[in-house]
Image (tube, rainbow, N blue to C red):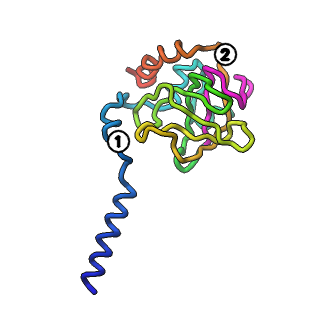
Amino acid sequence: MRRISGLIALLLVGALSACASHPPGYSAWMANAPRYPGLSCAPFARSLSGIALTGDAADWWGEAAGRYARDHRPMVGSVLVFRRSSRLPSGHVSVVSRVLAPRQIQVIQANWEPEVLDVDQLIVDVSPTNDWSEVRVWYPPINQIGSSVYATYGFVLPDRPASHEMLAGASRRAALYATGG
């Protein structure tokens, strides 16, 4: 009986450690990802987009009211504002770099993975009414779209139009500026 309970405990520890482990390829991906110590999404998005909002990322939607146009359709250079959640306690913001299809965009974003800058990362609208209120995000460590669904407010539109080339070309400089580098 003692031997069986020990075996069960060993299996339980193994199962729990497997739950906490990272997906295959995660370590290699993290080892090769450029790091920007202190990088966070809101200062980066402000620097790259020119949208002069401050505070937590989730507050950008309310802060934009009366200052910037807001929409539920993406455009290049706009900022997608994620709502607060248990996974995103301050929300999240990312800058649209390409509109691929009515329900697919690519973004440039900071800190989806800690201190990492992602360029042209896929986000898919999975909302039932096609209004970008729920999205799934590409997860680089596993090289596929993530399974989690994130609630969003919509898009804050910049004062000036942007192009993919302009945003991609300025992304590393914006990351350095956002970190004080």
Q: Residue at x 52, y 40 (%)?
A: 145
Predominant SS along the magenta part: loop
Position of residue 150 relative to residue 34, above or below, is below
- Nearer the N terminus, badge 2 or badge 1? 1
| Residue positioned most to the bottom | 1
Position of residue 162 relative to residue 56, above or below, is above
For label 2, count other residues whose C-alpha is less than 10 Å away and answer few (under 14), some (14-19) or many (20+): some
For label 1, count other residues whose C-alpha is less than 10 Å away and answer few (under 14), some (14-19) or many (20+): few
Which residues fall within the magenta stretch? Answer: 63-83
Quadrant position of the N terminus in the picture: bottom left
* Quadrant of residue 115 within the rendered picture: top left
Q: CA distance from mark 2 to mark 1?
A: 40 Å
**Disc 2 versus disc 1: nearer the observer:** 1
Q: How many marks?
A: 2
Q: In the rendered structure, find residue 159 and report the number of the disc placed on it.
A: 2
Local secondary structure at mark 1: loop
Side of 96 relative to 24 (left or right):
right
* Quadrant of residue 113 within the rendered picture: top left
Task: In this rendered view, identify the residue nearer to me: 148 or 24.
Answer: 24
Side of 21 relative to 111 (left or right):
left
Q: In the rendered structure, find residue 25 and report the number of the disc placed on it.
A: 1
Side of 50 relative to 174 (left or right):
right
Position of residue 144 relative to residue 117, above or below, is below
* Quadrant of residue 79 within the rendered picture: top right
Residue 26: where, in percent of width, then height?
Answer: 36, 42
Q: Residue at x 55, y 36 (%)?
A: 92
* Residue type indicated by callout 1: Gly
